[in-house]
Image: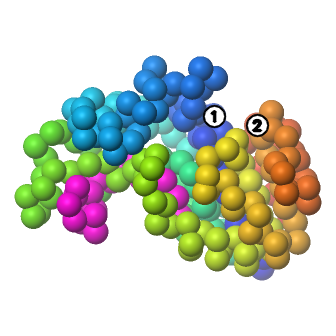
């Protein structure tokens, strides 16, 4: 049984119908990142930010895991598998993966603006201004916005260092600190980067580049493990 770490980005979920975080024009669903994905944005226009994430949840609830998600989940029957994802969707879990670390938060969860340890799972898509935690404070999306710390990063680094196989799927490797994970996979005997357009990043020359969509690339890589 091998210890397999799968590190996924937006390209993993694109085939399920979710748009990538940052399109070619630098916008996310026609919004500048600074308008909807920073603490300052929530402070200056909270209703816009809440509405934006409500729409993302509605979209997510209409999507299903793709064959790539399912193949990764199926891998748990033969190996120890940890998924580290930059994605905020729950498609890995819905596909059946049981060990998922979300570096940038979870779209279907919300947390208190004052007591961040108070985290709740939404049963529907809508979070409204005036929805409070049990201590009476406004709830916000359970998302790691730009400018905020990535609380799960240290754990992700530890897991990456112990990998026998390290597979990177559908990420531009441009958002730090998450992108730096590729440099910690120093014990991996096999390393793969699956992306239709990517080049090997600096310091990752020992990765095998698989220029393919997430689903097809997963099939190719897993067939050889």
Rendered position, 188 above or below 74: below
> Residue at horizontal 8%, vertical 58%?
136
Quadrant (top left/top right/bottom left/bottom right) for the C terminus: bottom right
Where disc 1 sits, the SS reads loop
Rendered position, 188 above or below 33: below
**For residue 71, which numbered disc appears in the image?**
none
> Residue at horizontal 23%, vertical 55%?
113
Magenta stretch: includes residue 210: no
* Separation (CA) of disc 1 from disc 2: 8 Å
Q: Percent x, y for residue 94?
A: 49, 53
Label 2 packing within 10 angstroms: few (<14), some (14-19), many (20+): some
Q: Is residue 178 left or right of residue 3?
A: left
Residues under numbered marks 1 and 2 in contact, where contact means CB atoms less than 8 Å apart? yes
Q: Nearer the viewer, residue 158 or 79?
A: 158
Residue behind mark 2: 213
> Residue at horizontal 10%, vertical 43%?
130
Residue behind mark 1: 15
Q: Is residue 120 left or right of residue 156?
A: left
Q: Percent x, y for residue 128?
A: 17, 39
Asked if one can make out residue 132 in the rendered structure from this viewpoint, the answer is: yes
Rendered position, 55 above or below 175: above
Asked if one can make out residue 98 in the rendered structure from this viewpoint, the answer is: no
Q: Percent x, y for residue 206?
A: 91, 60
Quadrant (top left/top right/bottom left/bottom right) for the N terminus: bottom right
> Residue at horizontal 67%, vertical 44%?
174
Q: Quadrant of residue 135?
A: bottom left
Q: Percent x, y for residue 140?
A: 26, 49
Query: N-terminal of the two: label 1 or label 2?
Result: 1
What segment carries the magenta color?
Answer: 101-120
Where disc 2 sits, the SS reads loop
Q: Is residue 36 left or right of residue 133?
A: right
């Amino acid at each position: 049984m091998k210890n397999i770490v799968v590190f996924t980005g937006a390209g993993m979920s694109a085939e399920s119908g979710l748009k990538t975080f940052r399109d070619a024009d630098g916008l996310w669903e026609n919004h500048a990142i600074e308008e909807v994905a920073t603490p300052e944005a929530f402070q200056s226009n909270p209703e816009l930010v809440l509405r934006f994430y409500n729409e993302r949840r509605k979209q997510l609830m209409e999507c299903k895991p793709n064959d790539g998600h399912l193949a990764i989940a199926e891998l748990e029957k033969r190996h120890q598998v940890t998924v580290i994802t930059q994605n905020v969707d729950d498609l890995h879990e819905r596909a059946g993966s049981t060990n998922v670390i979300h570096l940038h938060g979870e779209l279907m969860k919300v947390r208190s603006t004052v007591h961040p340890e108070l985290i709740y799972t939404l049963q529907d898509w809508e979070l409204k201004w005036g929805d409070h935690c049990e201590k009476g404070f406004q709830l916000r999306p359970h998302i790691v916005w730009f400018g905020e710390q990535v609380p799960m990063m240290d754990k992700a680094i530890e897991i990456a260092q112990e990998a026998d196989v390290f597979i990177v799927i559908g990420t531009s490797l441009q958002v730090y600190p998450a992108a730096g994970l590729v440099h910690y996979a120093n014990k991996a005997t096999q390393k793969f980067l699956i992306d239709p357009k990517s080049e090997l990043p600096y310091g990752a020359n020992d990765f095998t580049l698989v220029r393919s969509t997430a689903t097809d690339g997963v099939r190719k890589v897993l067939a050889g493990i």
